[in-house]
């Protein structure tokens, strides 16, 4: 018996084949709904998210239950070419390793300006000082979107977040250059928070080592809202389309990412009914899967 694994809270390992189904049936009779291993939809995971975390950008538990509850047959009766995993993370910190470890990763994000709290920003500055601010926050921004400004020189342009850190200086964030890496929000929790216009990004094809080595998920939907019942139904419809396409087109013992690598991303997107979106990639030719005609 193993507790709290990647694919379930309690795992029963090493059962003989003859005893698996009788044990499964007994747990069902007790009222438990079990997942399993093999070429099937695996038990899903979500982060604690909205229940406890200020970084959460959507209702992760509702998203997980919506998708899993509508696809339980594929979990109970293995009928896929190989295993398939859904995972749900409330923000780009991705605390359940969805981008690296799931065939379809739903990641919380936002598309407006980072929110700021001046009181907490000044408390951070008082506790850590200017050197720490410059070294740990401004200097480690991967796109150099954060700069230190004198308060009177802060830009008022659209797309700029700014917050005073003392009586003379402020940090300025150019949100159009932000890649949602979460570093500054993690270093200054509460002083910087996700924007208000929140939703999710969808990645497909992440997995551990198998045929072509470890892969991270490929962006297929840069942003979609996930608030109303209709939004959650659209997520479930997308999940079902991807699962069906995988079932019909993958080779035996082939994960979704390997299938996409074999048939091409454009063919995969066409098969699941999605248009190619330029926002899927950082720049033309940067992603070898996408040809921008």
Image (cartoon, rainbow, N blue to C red):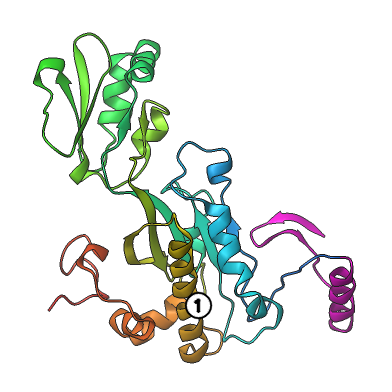
Depicted 146 relative to depicted 34: above or below = above
Q: Left or right: 59 with respect to 274?
A: right
Quadrant that contains the C terminus: bottom left
Residue at x 19%, y 45% (from the top left corner): 176
Quadrant that contains the N terminus: bottom right
Residue at x 38%, y 14% (from the top left corner): 123
Depicted 14 relative to depicted 77: above or below = above
In the image, which residues are magenta?
Answer: 1-30
Q: What residue does disc 1 label?
A: 240
Task: Give coordinates of residue 64: x percent, y percent.
Answer: 57, 60
Q: Quadrant of residue 156?
A: top left
Task: Give coordinates of residue 267: x percent, y percent.
Answer: 31, 85
Q: How many marks can you see?
A: 1
Is residue 22 magenta-colored? Answer: yes
Q: Secondary structure at mark 1?
A: helix
Residues 274 and 135: in front is 274
Task: Give coordinates of residue 265: x percent, y percent.
Answer: 32, 79
Is residue 228 magenta-colored? Answer: no
Q: Quadrant of residue 120?
A: top left
Residue at x 17%, y 69% (from the top left corner): 285
Task: Give coordinates of residue 217: x percent, y percent.
Answer: 40, 65
Q: Is residue 39 visible?
A: yes
Q: Left or right: 2 with respect to 260?
A: right
Residue at x 33%, y 13% (from the top left corner): 129
Residues 180 and 236: in front is 236
Q: Left or right: 147 with respect to 209?
A: left
Q: Is residue 211 visible?
A: no
Q: Quadrant of residue 25?
A: bottom right
Q: Residues within 10 Å of mark 1 (few under 14, many from 20)?
A: some
């Amino acid at each position: 018996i193993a507790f709290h694994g990647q694919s379930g809270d309690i795992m029963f390992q090493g059962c003989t084949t003859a005893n698996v189904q009788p044990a499964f049936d007994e747990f069902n009779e007790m009222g438990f709904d079990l997942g399993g291993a093999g070429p099937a939809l695996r038990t899903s995971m979500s982060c604690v998210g909205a229940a406890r975390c200020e970084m959460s950008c959507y209702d992760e538990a509702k998203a997980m239950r919506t998708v899993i509850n509508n696809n339980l047959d594929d979990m109970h009766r293995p009928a896929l070419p190989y295993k398939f995993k859904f995972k749900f993370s409330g923000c780009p910190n991705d605390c359940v390793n969805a981008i690296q470890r799931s065939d379809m990763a739903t990641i919380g994000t936002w598309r407006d300006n980072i929110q700021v709290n001046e009181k907490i920003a000044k408390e951070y500055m008082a506790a850590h000082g200017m050197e720490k601010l410059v070294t740990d926050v401004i200097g480690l921004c991967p796109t150099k979107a954060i700069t230190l400004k004198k308060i009177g020189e802060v830009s008022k342009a659209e797309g700029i977040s700014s917050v005073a850190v003392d009586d003379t200086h402020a940090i300025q964030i150019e949100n159009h250059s932000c890649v949602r890496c979460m570093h500054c929000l993690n270093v200054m929790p509460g002083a910087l928070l996700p924007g208000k216009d929140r939703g999710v990004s969808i990645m497909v094809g992440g997995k551990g080592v198998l045929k072509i080595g470890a892969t991270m998920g490929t962006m297929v939907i840069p942003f979609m809202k996930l608030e109303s019942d209709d939004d959650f139904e659209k997520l479930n419809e997308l999940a079902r389309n991807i699962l069906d396409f995988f079932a019909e087109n993958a080779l035996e013992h082939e994960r979704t990412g390997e299938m996409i690598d074999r048939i091409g991303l454009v063919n995969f997107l066409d098969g699941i009914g999605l248009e190619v979106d330029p926002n899927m990639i950082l720049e033309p030719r940067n992603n070898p899967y996408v040809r921008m005609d």
